[in-house]
Amino acid sequence: MRYLPLTPADRAEMLGVIGAATIDDLFVDVPDAARKADLFDLPLHAGEMEVERALSALAARNRPAGAGPFFCGAGAYKHHVPATVDHIIQRSEFLTSYTPYQPEIAQGTLQVLFEFQTQVAALTGLEVANASMYDGSTACAEAVMMAQRVTRRKKAVLSGGLHPHYAAVTQTIAHAEGMDITRQAVAIDAEADVLSAIDAETACVVVQTPNVFGVVTDVSKIAEAAHAAGALLIVVTTEAVSYGLLKSPGEMGADIAVGEGQSIGVGLNYGGPYIGLFAAREKFVRQMPGRLCGETVDAEGARGFVLTLSTREQHIRREKATSNICTNSGLCALAFTIHMTLLGERGLRELAALNHSRARELREALAAVPGVEILSPRFFNEFAIRVPGKATDVVEALLADGVVAGVPFSRLDPKAGMDDVLLVAATETTTRDDIAAFAKALKGRTA
């Protein structure tokens, strides 16, 4: 039975309030060429088996990342996720106890989030982490707005190495808060250029390491300069596995560290859902977005967990809220925590070293291809190369050889003037045969 609660009289009254004569008036901005007068050419109904067959046929037209040599990165990475992760997150006590809206939520979920926060704080080298954000890009935007609250300043400086999607999200959200965003020109290895833009009005500087081109930078001197001007340093990391090999943001003087946690425990999944990491100095905890779970004892002295801090607009006065985030990425946080627990410190360090080793092998193989130039001087598991012609054409050509060659930078920023730049990544899932196939196919297409 169809549920249509509005009567014609109801619709007429509503249209009258907004000044429209008919429902069609609501779509006058849609060009006629984009409108469809009749129904789509789809069956009005079908049996379950017929639907499964049709959708399976559509799905079969896609190529899974693991079907052959795969070198895409640019903020989303193909890592091995142990079967244990999927097994545990599908247990009913985890899968059904979703997000902590109330402090009296299930103790198991609160404990998992507490452990997740502990792990993120340890990885980033900062004192306190929240129970996750939507993804890395929104975490970056939230960090900029947090810096505004802490410093009471309006200016934010974004480095030219910041992922263009992160920069765009930050500009969109921060603009609504009345912030002045200074986004520096795209640059492969110029995180330190933010120094020239720091002044007495700067609330924060945002740098990324490894940056979108894979370049690793020690940002300690940037932190010193920012602090000398009364500004905060925000460090972005899109590849969480790099924490196992590189200096943590906290070690380099960051006040806030944000990033994408997809690399640990979460598959590529057609682009989401992912999980935003957010950590900061303890002195700024009251200005952190999202929510925090804490450890305590109950009336009988037994260990327990509670929702300690939740300064979002659904819980407190809107003007006092530090965030309007509706939920943490609870299931992805659980997957992250399980995978990180399985790895441990030693396992993460070994995994990070293996990623770097594979990337070095890839660099050597591609550097030997005539016409290819390696652009990233220091890298973890991803770097940029310059190819003859357009990178998009090279990627399309190599698909015929069964190789997914990477991400053309022009897909991330079409206006950057880097049409010949290709971002390539290698992880522990990359084999030597994959690397050889990539180099051979690229040599054949550039010769």
Image (tube, rainbow, N blue to C red):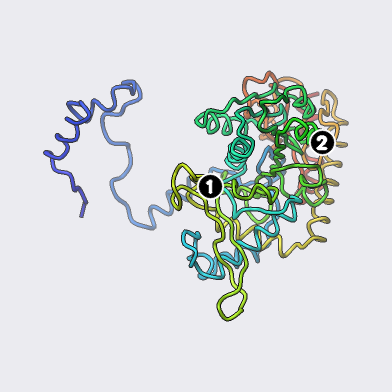
Q: Is residue 441 above or below residue 311?
A: above
Residue 362 x %, y % = 83, 39
In the image, farthest residue toward the bottom: 300
Residue occupying image coordinates x 31% and y 21%: 32
Disc 2 to disc 1: CB gap under 8 Å:
no
Q: Amino acid at mark 1?
A: Ala
Residue occupying image coordinates x 66% and y 63%: 115
- Residue placed most toward the observer, 71 or 286: 286
Question: Which residue is disc 1 drawn over?
Answer: 60
Please tell me the numbered disc located at residue 75. none
* Quarter of the image that includes the C terminus: top right
Circle 1 packing at 10 Å, graded few (<14), some (14-19), many (20+), is few
Residue occupying image coordinates x 71% and y 60%: 340
The CA distance from mark 2 to mark 1 is 41 Å
Circle 2 packing at 10 Å, graded few (<14), some (14-19), many (20+), is some
Residue 314 x %, y % = 43, 50
Q: Is residue 396 left or right of residue 105?
A: right
- Residue placed most toward the observer, 217 or 286: 286
* Number of numbered discs visible in the structure rendering: 2
Which is more foreground, mark 2 or mark 1?
Answer: 2
Residue 71 position by quadrant: top right
User: Callout 2: helix, strand or loop?
Assistant: loop
Residue 336 position by quadrant: bottom right
N-term-proximal mark, 2 vs 1: 1
Q: Amino acid at mark 2?
A: Thr
Question: Which residue is disc 2 drawn over?
Answer: 217
Q: Is residue 359 left or right of residue 334?
A: right
